Amino acid sequence: MTKAENIQLGSYQLGAGQAPFIIAELSGNHDQSLDKALAMVDAAAAAGAHAIKLQTYTADTMTLDIDSGDFFIDNPDSLWFGQSLYKLYQIANTPWDWHAPIFERAKALGLVAFSTPFDLTAVDFLETLQVPCYKIASFENTDHALLAAVARTGKPVIMSTGMASQSELAEAVEVLRAHGCKDLILLKCTSNYPAEPIDANLRTIPHLAELFQCQAGLSDHCTGIGVAVAAVALGATVIEKHFVLDRCEGGVDAEFSLEPAELKMLVDETRRAQLALGTVHYGVTSKEVASRRHRRSLYISMDLKAGDVLSTDNVRSIRPGLGLAPKYLPMVLGKTVKTDVARGTALSWNLLA
């Protein structure tokens, strides 16, 4: 995986060697309650997340107010089966006048706060709130006008890659960079809700980073944290996960969202995974030096008199490791000892005649 330059977001450094940057996506799980949205921010901070993310749109900026045909969700496998797009977005959107208080609460708790704009008016609005970066959703990664507008802000861009072919991604990255985006993070994403681990194809993460010479991460719609931990092992520097206070209370994305205790586990376990990567290393680490004492080695296992011959009856490979290495057993068998030797003596070359 390429070693892209670190990116500064707030007080956090994103990049190889840094703790994975964990984004809690509030989405519409606030159930149209500002108090619940603020409680979600508090809970995300308490769980150790590094950022919270909103989605900035209205039903009218997303679609048309039509309840039939192309605008009706008739897929029985969809979480949102039986709703029109317009009504779904009315339920799921975060009111724009909530953004400022949510962002202020997040910043007060040390979180990076930003959003996903879904059209040009949302970009203009988010600029008035001085967001530090932008997220592009998978469904918008082919909207070149939106990409150009976000890139022109000069701020870091995090873009999900769901559904996009390699050529579509190449076009998107070209648009972003041509319009001023210097700091780019691509998130491997499976645009299915909930997604199955078998569809995650996490080996794409290092390929994305190498192909586009940028950082790569994961926008995860699978349940649990296992897929995200595996992504970090493959070099992901950013993990985005939907968040909910209590799945039992529902919420438009609750089924594939993490509760606070699970979010804390995600933060802790992805950090462990990142630390465990380390470097290519063989031999003793500083923490293993004392453990060498407990290797096996050769010991005298019977009291011997000077001139006795060493054999498998009186020499054994046992713990601890203060005698000759076990590999020397064939060399010492048949040799004689030059002094009396007590049972439990570590075998050394100077004991031999």
Image (spheres, rainbow, N blue to C red):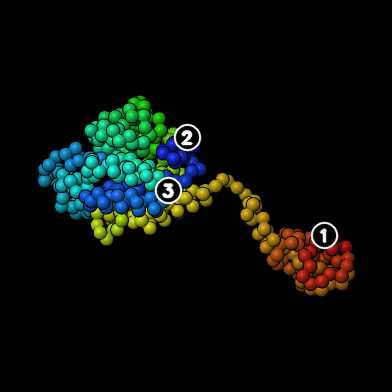
Picture coordinates of residue 183, whole percent (x, y): 40, 33
- When the figure is inspected, residue 195 is found, relative to residue 186, above or below; the finding is below
Q: Which residue is mark 2?
A: 5
Q: Amino acid at mark 1?
A: Trp
Is 205 positioned to the left or the right of 192 in the image?
right
Point out the frontmost of discs 2 and 1.
Answer: 2
Q: Which residue is mark 3?
A: 231
Kindly check if marks 2 and 1 are in contact, taking CB atoms under 8 A apart as contact.
no
- When the figure is inspected, residue 294 is found, relative to residue 231, above or below; the finding is below
How far apart in space, not on screen, are marks 3 and 1 (Cα)?
51 Å
Q: Is residue 254 visible?
A: yes
- When the figure is inspected, residue 148 is found, relative to residue 253, above or below; the finding is above
* Disc on res. 349: 1
Question: In this view of the protein, which residue sits in the foreground, 51 or 79?
Answer: 51
Picture coordinates of residue 87, whole percent (x, y): 15, 47
Residue located at (24% from left, 32% from top):
120
Instruction: Give the number of marks.
Output: 3
Residue located at (88% from left, 63% from top):
353
Kindly check if marks 3 and 2 are in contact, taking CB atoms under 8 A apart as contact.
no
Helix, strand or loop at label 3? It is helix
Label 1, residues with CA under 10 Å away: few <14, some 14-19, many ≥20? few
Picture coordinates of residue 327, whole percent (x, y): 72, 59
Helix, strand or loop at label 1? It is helix
Residue located at (31% from left, 38% from top):
136
